[in-house]
Amino acid sequence: MKASCLFVFLILLCAACGEAEQAVAPNTSGGDPVIAKLDAAILADPTRAALHARRASLWYEKDNYDAAITDLRAALSIDSTNIEYHWTLSDVYLDYYRSRLALRMLERAAALDPNNVETQLRLAETQIILKQYEEALRSLNEVTRLDPRNPDAYLLLSEAFLETGDTARAIKSAEEATEIDPDLTDGFIRVGQLLFSRGQPRAGTYFDAAVAIDPTDPVAIHAKADYLRDTENIPEAIQTYRAASRADHQYVAGYFNAGLLLMELDSVPRAKAEFDLVIKNDPFHIRAYFFRGYARELLGDVAGARKDYRTALRFAPEYTLALEGMARVGEAE
């Protein structure tokens, strides 16, 4: 290693340790028995990095980002060369809207092991998020040097090219990803979307291919429905949206979009039935309450509309459409 590179590496390593040393006392379990056991284990032996990392993962699952960060810093203060700790801390920072810190962690991981493909992919993805497209392209070129047949690298290259306005290369990279991995659903959807944006009639075949990979994948089915909607095949789009939610009842976006299209077609009773299904499977879907209320209002069910508007406003008191709906139907006498 050249002297200059070694100097940079030592600076990064020291900085990582410095952050880790800021870790505070163990977190309380919050009633979780697994975390409580880890609390006791860490108290008995605070020098085991894996215990801190395990507890950090549990805090992360609970969206307790501060506690997760504290534990990951402690883990890194014990084992500053563990790449996976860097990855996890970067993920936490990203979800905590601290993208610059997320980037720093991945840069440190890359300094530790420049030939780690997963690190370079994560680094490129974060650079794209931060709109550092030239840096992202360099990271992805490094991935393709290390692993010339990595489909994820080509999919990210497609995204970077698209963001820089090079649609032709974006399409080519996404197609390369699907050729390398014929089961890469996201790749087929990406190619379909890009081809459609350029008015290419063969776009539809890529959405069909995405669904064919897994006919029960609601995301792929929904993407095909979007394409059908955008190409004015409305009846088929409605059926395809419904198929997305039938594939996974917790995926209510299909029912919701079908309802919106039916409202546009003035098929209000059928639209209401779709919003009923949304609310049945997701009782906290605010927009579904509003649109079901609006459907009820159009059907003359003022009391039902009022009830739905009130529910929407209970979840979102400043929701303009629901406020306007309440103004139309008025308070109950």
Image (spheres, rainbow, N blue to C red):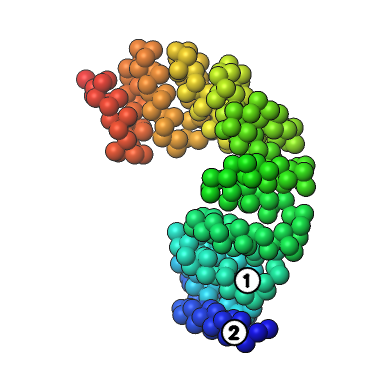
- Is residue 67 visible to us here? yes
Q: Relative to 316, is 51 above or below?
A: below
- Is residue 49 visible to us here? no
Q: Which residue is mark 1?
A: 110
**Residue 322 x, y percent position in the rendering:** 32, 29
At 50% from the left edge and 35% from the top edge, which residue is drawn? 282
Q: What label sits on residue 4 in the rendered view?
A: 2
Q: Disc 2 marks which amino acid? A: Ser
Q: Relative to 20, is 129 above or below?
A: above
**Residue 76 x, y percent position in the rendering:** 58, 77
- Per the image, label 1 sits on a secondary structure element best described as helix
**Residue 3 x, y percent position in the rendering:** 62, 87
Q: Disc 1 marks which amino acid? A: Ala
Quarter of the image for residue 91 reads: bottom right
Left or right of 205: which side holds 288? Answer: left
| Label 2 environment density (alpha carbons within 10 Å; few <14, some 14–19, many ≥20) | few
